[in-house]
Image: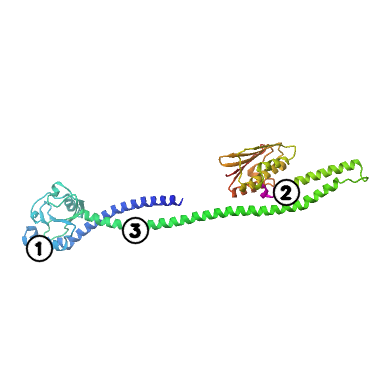
């Protein structure tokens, strides 16, 4: 379970992280273009508008040389592939490749847009006629900035060509740094989540083990109490009643009539029946005996002690084998169910079955009595024992279901795992 949670979390983190890196990379490249436009605008305002004088426009060699030296000193960088100053008619006033100065080329689209709007423009390098100055290509980013004021009063456009891969590398380096930080954070998050999940699973296992131990401990304590009650009954009331039966059966010559003797023997027989019943119930109080004896035999014994007016049937699957740890539960549920049949159901027939199924061993007790409503009558005195048995079965890992309706009898089903 912990591994599934970690794998699902890792999948979510990788998906979101990948989407985040892709979006960030796109935004960073847009930012690099905006920064390039800002740098070119700064170049224009810092020097180009003041350095582009009439002598430069007239093609004066000294002015061109001074302008060119300033360009290499202050504005040419490793990622710079070209510089050019354009007239609106396509004449090159200045270019890093001085052989292009004075020549006329088709004015680039970005230059036309800059002259028309008065704002900086950027584009990925084009081909065809726009590649005429020699350095313009698809691998270059071209930025055009109009000269808003200059000494000549002639509209001019300053162009800067930058290596596209250099800008991409800068953005990629930043993306890699952010991705590493995201990966580190995700790793710490997964580690913390894994440790927390593992701790929760261990805690759940301990609590489940504790509940199992508590259920067993409660059963053991109840067994001790029932054993004490059984011992007290056997050594006290049962022995006293047995003694009374013996006294009643003892002959009293010459002191009673034949009718009185017959009545006394009948009464002694009733006392002995009561003693037998009480001894059977005393044995039932001791669950350790239920764990040791044969459950089918115990079920048959309980059915035999039911009133003679109830028709009783027992069906036992030869493959039904109950673990010793669950025999007391089967015994107690059957005992409670048959007690309800005797005392409350007014049934004429009861069927008890013990079968082996795919889920384990199943005990069913079915009667054709008056039934009851489990939703409304479960807390009545005659049915609280079944509710307690249901809770006990759940705590022990078994499953108890009660199906009943008024006038339709009752079926109690206990599923005990293998």
Q: Nearer the viewer, mark 2 or mark 3?
A: 2
Q: Nearer the viewer, mark 1 or mark 2?
A: 2
Q: Is residue 284 magenta?
A: yes
Q: CA distance from mark 1 to mark 3?
A: 48 Å
Residue 356 position (above or below residue 146): above
Question: Residue 354's quadrant in the figure?
Answer: top right
Q: Which mark is residue 66?
A: 1
Q: Residue at x 83, y 44 (%)?
A: 268
Q: Earlier in the sequence, mark 2 or mark 3?
A: 3
Image spot of residue 336 (x, y percent): 68, 45
Q: Main secondary structure of the magenta part?
A: helix
Question: Circle 3 — which element?
Answer: helix
Report the front residue among 282 and 89. Answer: 282
Q: Label 2: few (<14), some or many (≥20) within 10 Å? A: some
Whether residue 390 appears in this view of the structure is no
Q: Which residue is mark 2?
A: 282
Q: CA distance from mark 1 to mark 2?
A: 121 Å
17 with respect to 327 (left or right): left
Q: Is residue 179 magenta?
A: no
129 with respect to 34 (left or right): left
Quarter of the image for the C terminus: give it. Answer: top right
Q: Earlier in the sequence, mark 1 or mark 2?
A: 1
Q: Residue furthest right?
A: 254
Question: Circle 2 — which element?
Answer: helix
Q: Which residue is mark 3?
A: 181
Image spot of residue 252 (x, y percent): 90, 46
Find out whether the residues at labels 1 and 3 contact each other: C-beta distance under 8 Å: no
Span highlighted in magenta in the image: 279-290
Residue 70 position (above or below residue 263): below
Q: Nearer the viewer, mark 1 or mark 3?
A: 3
């Amino acid at each position: 379970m912990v591994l599934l949670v970690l794998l699902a979390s890792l999948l979510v983190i990788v998906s979101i992280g990948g989407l985040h890196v892709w979006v960030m990379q796109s935004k960073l490249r847009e930012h690099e273009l905006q920064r390039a436009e800002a740098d070119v605008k700064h170049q224009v305002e810092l020097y180009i508008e003041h350095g582009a004088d009439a002598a430069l426009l007239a093609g004066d060699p000294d002015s061109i040389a001074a302008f060119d030296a300033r360009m290499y000193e202050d504005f040419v960088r490793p990622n710079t592939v070209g510089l050019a100053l354009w007239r609106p008619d396509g004449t090159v006033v200045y270019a890093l490749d001085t052989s292009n100065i004075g020549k006329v080329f088709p004015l680039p689209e970005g230059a036309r847009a800059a002259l028309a709007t008065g704002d900086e423009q950027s584009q990925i390098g084009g081909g065809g006629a726009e590649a005429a100055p020699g350095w313009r290509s698809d691998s270059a980013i071209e930025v055009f900035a109009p000269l808003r004021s200059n000494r000549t009063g002639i509209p001019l456009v300053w162009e800067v060509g930058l290596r596209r891969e250099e800008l991409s590398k800068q953005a990629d380096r930043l993306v890699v740094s952010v991705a590493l930080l995201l990966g580190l954070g995700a790793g710490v998050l997964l580690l913390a989540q894994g440790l927390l999940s593992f701790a929760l699973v261990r805690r759940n296992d301990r609590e489940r083990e504790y509940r199992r131990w508590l259920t067993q401990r409660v059963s053991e304590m109840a067994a001790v109490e029932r054993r004490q009650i059984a011992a007290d009954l056997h050594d006290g009331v049962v022995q006293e009643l047995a003694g009374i039966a013996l006294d009643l059966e003892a002959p009293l010559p010459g002191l009673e009539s034949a009718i009185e003797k017959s009545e006394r023997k009948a009464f002694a027989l009733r006392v002995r029946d009561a003693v037998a019943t009480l001894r059977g119930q005393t044995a039932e109080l001791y669950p350790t005996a239920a764990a040791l004896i044969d459950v089918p035999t115990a079920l048959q014994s309980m059915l035999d002690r039911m009133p003679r007016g109830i028709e009783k049937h027992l069906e036992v699957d030869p493959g039904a084998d109950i673990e010793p740890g669950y025999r007391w539960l089967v015994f107690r549920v059957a005992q409670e169910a048959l007690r309800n049949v005797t005392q409350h159901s007014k049934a004429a027939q009861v069927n008890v079955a013990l079968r082996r199924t795919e889920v384990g061993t199943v005990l069913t007790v079915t009667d054709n009595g008056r039934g009851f409503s489990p939703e409304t009558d479960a807390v009545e005195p005659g049915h609280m024992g079944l509710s307690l048995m249901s809770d006990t079965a759940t705590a022990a890992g078994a499953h108890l279901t009660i199906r009943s309706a008024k006038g339709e009898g009752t079926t109690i089903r206990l599923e005990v795992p293998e």
